[in-house]
Amino acid sequence: MKRIDETPSTIERIFGAVMASAFAGGTAIAAPWILAWKYPIKFFIFFPLTSVLVMPMFYVWILIVVIYALSAGFRYGFFGVLDIFNLIWRTGETNDRVLRDAAEKYRVLIPVTIFVSYLLILHVF
């Protein structure tokens, strides 16, 4: 396994950015559709009435999350992002302080992404 303090190659940076941004963007985009599946009548009646206000904020939030994830991918590379995901989901042990700090930072970002996405839609109701 590659250490986080090794500089990732350009191709690793690109793959890391794509993977991290796809994960973050998918998380942000999925939240309102989960809400629509759970409350279909409320969602499809009230959502179009306020979509002029809600959707621009929602798209800005997705853009922020994706840019944040892109920066992580470019900084840590593909294997660094995989290690961060591993630490987030499986609370793995590591002696690498930089990697541990990154995992803590992104561990907070995932629920915040879901929470803010829900808030942007739920304020409609």
Image (spheres, helix red, strand yellow):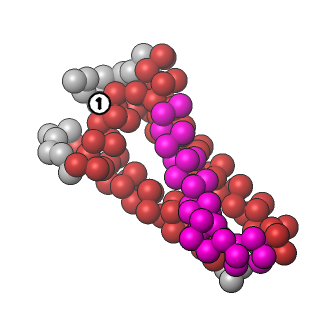
Give the image location of residue 99, x and y in percent. 28, 41
Residue in the picture at 77% in, 77% down? 46
Q: In screen coordinates, is 95 left or right of 32?
A: left
In the structure shown, which secondary structural element does the residue marked by tag 1 occupy?
Answer: loop
Range of the magenta residues? 18-47
Q: Is residue 38 above or below residue 87?
A: below
Q: Badge 1, how many Cα within 10 Å: few under 14, some, many 20+?
A: some
Q: In screen coordinates, is 10 left or right of 37?
A: left
Q: Is residue 125 above or below residue 83?
A: below
Query: What secondary structure is the magenta-colored segment mainly?
Result: helix
Residue in the picture at 22% in, 24% down? 1
Give the image location of residue 121, x and y in percent. 66, 71
Give the image location of residue 23, x and y in percent. 49, 43
Magenta stretch encompasses residue 39: yes
Give the image location of residue 103, x and y in percent. 32, 48
Question: Residue lying farthest front?
Answer: 41
In the picture, residue 36 is in which quadrant? bottom right
Q: Is residue 21 above or below residue 90?
A: above
Question: Residue lying farthest bottom?
Answer: 125
Residue topped by disc 1: 4
Q: In screen coordinates, is 70 left or right of 82?
A: right
Magenta stretch encompasses residue 103: no
Residue in the picture at 24% in, 27% down? 3
Which quarter of the figure is the C terminus placed in? bottom right
In the picture, residue 45 is in which quadrant? bottom right
Amino acid tagged 1: Ile
Most foreground residue, 7 or 51:
51
